[in-house]
Structure formats: C-alpha cells, structure tokens
Image: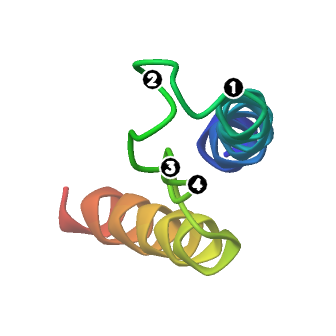
Amino acid sequence: MYDASGIRLYAGRQAELLNQIVCEFPPDHPLSSIRPVTKLLGHTPIQVVADGILGCIIAVLMRNSN
C-alpha cells in the first residue's frame, strides 16, 4: 500500500521539478516548447484504501470457501 501511494507522491514531485526546469529554458531552446509532464501517476489514496478493503474481503471469502 505504501508503494502504491508513495509512487504518486514522488513522481508528482519529480514532474513538478522537471516542469520548472523546462520553464527556465530560453525561448530558442529546442525543449522549451514541449508540453508539461503530467503529475497524475500511481494510485489515489481512495484507490489504495479500496484495494486494501477488497483484498481483505477476497481473503475472507477464499478462506470460507474451503
């Protein structure tokens, strides 16, 4: 769960830094006209919690089926 939510945090930080670096390029630089890097990567906190709950439910159902 930590990895699923942590990737979003660190990738977002890196994307912000890369966008800031590109914005500081002079206008005649070849990379100054590229579109910004998106910051939406990984899972949202709601998705992480929902996946954890779903995993627990499936584990209980599988245990009870035997």
Q: Which residue is mark 2?
A: 31
Q: Secondary structure at mark 3?
A: loop
Disc 4 to disc 2, how far (Cα)? 19 Å
Disc 2 to disc 3, how far (Cα)? 11 Å
Q: Earlier along the polypeptide chain: callout 1 or callout 4?
A: 1
Residue 63 position, x and y percent, is 35, 57
Q: Secondary structure at mark 4?
A: loop
> Which image quarter is the C terminus in?
bottom left
Neighbor class of circle 1 (other Cα within 10 Å; few <14, some 14-19, many 20+) is few
* Amino acid type for the residue under numbered disc 1: Phe
Q: Nearer the viewer, mark 2 or mark 3?
A: 2
Is the residue under label 2 in contact with that under label 4 (CB below 8 Å)? no
Residue 11 position, x and y percent, is 65, 36
Neighbor class of circle 3 (other Cα within 10 Å; few <14, some 14-19, many 20+) is some
Residue occupying the point 31% across, 68% down: 64
- Residue 22 is left or right of residue 61, and the answer is right
Q: Is residue 34 above or below residue 60?
A: above
Q: Earlier along the polypeptide chain: callout 4 or callout 2?
A: 2
Neighbor class of circle 2 (other Cα within 10 Å; few <14, some 14-19, many 20+) is few
Q: Earlier along the polypeptide chain: callout 2 or callout 1?
A: 1
Disc 2 to disc 1, how far (Cα)? 8 Å
